[in-house]
Amino acid sequence: MAGKPQVKIIAVGKLRESFWRDADAEYRKRLTGYTTKLTLVEVADEATPEDASAAQEDIVKKKEGERILAQIGLRDYVIALDRQGKSLDSVAFASHLERVAVEGAGGALTFIIGGSLGLHDSILARADFALSFGAFTFPHQLMRVILMEQIYRAAKIQREENYHK
């Protein structure tokens, strides 16, 4: 990536299954040459009652949001993953990240992955950009792997390197 930015991924919940942890480890390894520092922060997810009301769901998202906000630096450029965000193809995503790295305020390029209910409005308000990976709903563990793959792909595109070997 342009100038090897610091990359931080803040995700609600942990990677529980070994296959997610293996994929995570693989992309961490692949990204080492493209970032100055890759930080993964897992914040605790809140238990949600099975028949939760909209108000109860908002309380859950707010608590998770407070944990997320505590991990964001003042100068971080925040990209929130949200289905209402802007969809980009891989080339446009690479271009966006490159522009942010060049114009950046010196903080980390910080990606936010919400829990099962999504992100609280406070996170979306703090975000500099909302990114959508489409209308599909993905488990947050899978989304973390997809995001890391796309960050890696973006770095390869920026350097005009061949992705598939």
Image (cartoon, rainbow, N blue to C red):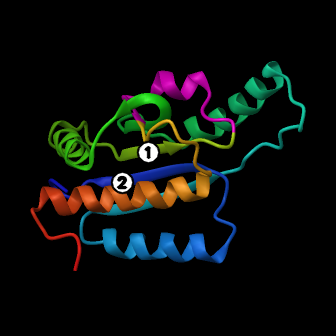
Q: Is residue 110 magenta?
A: no
| Magenta span of residues | 117-131
SS at badge 2: strand
In the rendered image, residue 38, in percent from the top left (x then y), is placed at 39, 62
Give the residue at x 26% y 54%: 5
In the rendered image, residue 2, in percent from the top left (x then y), is placed at 15, 53
Write down the residue under mark 1: 111
Within 10 Å of disc 1 (Cα), the crowding (few <14, some 14-19, many 20+) is many
37 versus 102 height, above or below: below
Would residue 5 appear left or right of 41 to someone viewing this image?
Answer: left
Write down the residue under mark 2: 7
Give the residue at x 24% y 44%: 97
* Front-lying residue, 74 or 141: 141
- The amino acid marked with disc number 2 is Val
Contact (CB < 8 A) between labels 1 and 2? yes
Pointer 1 or 2: first along the chain: 2
Residue 85 sits in which quadrant? top left
Give the residue at x 54% y 29%: 123
